[in-house]
Image (tube, grey):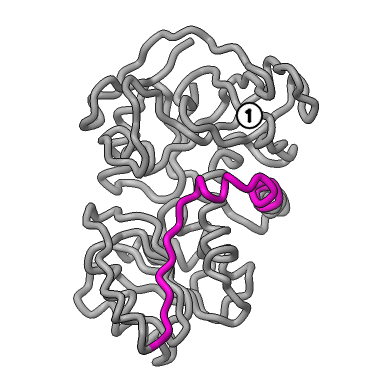
Amino acid sequence: MKAIQFSNYGEPDVLEQVDKETPEPGEGQVLLEVKAIGVNFADTARRRGAYVVPTPLPFVPGAEVAGVVKEVGAGVENVQKGDRIVTLVESGAYSEYVTAAASFLIPIPEGVSDEQAVALPLQGLTAYHLIKTMGRFEPGESILVHAAAGGVGTLAVQLAKYFQAGNVIATASSEEKLDFAKELGADEGVNYTQENWREEVLQKNGGKEIDVALEMVGGDIFTETVKAMAPFGRVLTFGAASGVPPQLNATALMNKNLSVIGFFLPQIMAKPELVQQSLKELLELVDQDRLKLHIGGVYALSDAQQVHEDLENRKTMGKLVMKP
C-alpha cells in the first residue's frame, strides 16, 4: 500500500510517499480501506517533532480516518465487512489502509459523506468537549471563539449556538474570515490582529466581560484573553498556533475566581463512553443539516507536502481532507 511518512523532523518537504506492507488486524481491531483522511495542526507538530508526546521515527502521521471495513479481527462483533465507519487512530491514517481499534468505530449515517465524517473526530470532539465537558458551559453565557474560521473554530461557533449561548463572539485575522464565522452563526466578529481587539470584544459583549473563551493561539492573545474574562470565567487553552506558548501569571486569576483549563483530546479518548456518545451526536447533527461542515480543500494523498504548507501558512478556511 502507499503511505506518507517522514524519517526526519522538519519542513513539509520531509514528507515522502513510500510503499509499505498492508497491516493485518489484530485481536479487537479491524482493517480499514481509507476513503478520507483529516488533516490537522497536530500532524504538522508531529512532523516538526514538536508534539506534546514523543513522535518516533520513521512515522506515518494522521489520526482521523473514514473508511470501509475490509477485514475484522478476532473478538470484533460491533461491525462487519463493508461497513462505513469513522474513527480515530494513534497514527497511520496517511495511507491506503490502516488498522483501528473496534471500540472507537462509529457508523457513518447514510446521508453523511466520507469527507464530512472525517471532519468531526478531532476537531468536532475537541469543540464539543471544550465547550461542554471542560468549559462547563451553561445556556445564556457568552463565549469567545478565537480562530473562528479554522477547523475547531467553525464547529465551536455552531455548537455554542446549539448549546444556547447568549452571545458568540468570533475572532479571526481577516474580514473575510469574520464574515464566514458570522454565516455560521457568530453574533459578533473581531479582528484579533488589531491592537485594541480586547476592548472591541468587551464592547461587542454589551460592555460585559466574557464567561467562556476558547484559546489556541498562545502568546499575547492568551494574556489579553485572560484579562477579558468575567468573574468565574473559564479560559480553555488547547494549543499555541502562534508558536509562543501561553504564559500564565496565576495571581491574575485570583481576584475574579478565574479558571484556566488545559485540554488534550487523548484524555477524552481514554473515556470511550464520552467519545461514543458525543461523536454519534455530532454525526446526527450533520445528518439533520443542523451542523454545517466547511471542507476547505480536498487533496490527493500524494499532495501531503502541499496540504501541510497550506495549513501552516493559513491559506485555507475550514477542514482540509486528503483522499488516497
Mark 1 Cα shell of 10 Å, populated few (<14), some (14-19), many (≥20): some
Q: Is residue 247 left or right of residue 236?
A: left
Instruction: Give residue 250's quadrant in the image.
Output: bottom left
Q: Is residue 159 magenta?
A: no
The one of 63 and 58 positioned closer to us in this rendering = 58
Measured along the vertical axis of the image, is residue 297 above or below residue 179? above
Instruction: Give residue 115's quadrant in the image.
Output: top right
Measured along the vertical axis of the image, is residue 319 above or below residue 227? above
The one of 269 and 199 positioned closer to us in this rendering = 269
Measured along the vertical axis of the image, is residue 26 above or below residue 167? above
Q: Secondary structure at mark 1?
A: strand
- Residue 78 horizontal/vertical position (percent): 78, 30
- Which residue sits furthest bottom? 207
> What kind of residue is marked 1?
Ala
- Which residue sits furthest right? 77
Q: Which residue position is annotated with label 1?
A: 101
Q: Is residue 275 magenta?
A: yes
The rendered magenta stretch, by its main secondary structure, is classed as: helix
Q: Is residue 299 left or right of residue 161?
A: left
Q: Residue at x 40, y 29 (%)?
A: 61
Q: Which residues are magenta?
A: 256-280
The one of 317 and 266 positioned closer to us in this rendering = 266
Q: Residue at x 71, y 51 (%)?
A: 277
Measured along the vertical axis of the image, is residue 206 above or below residue 302? below
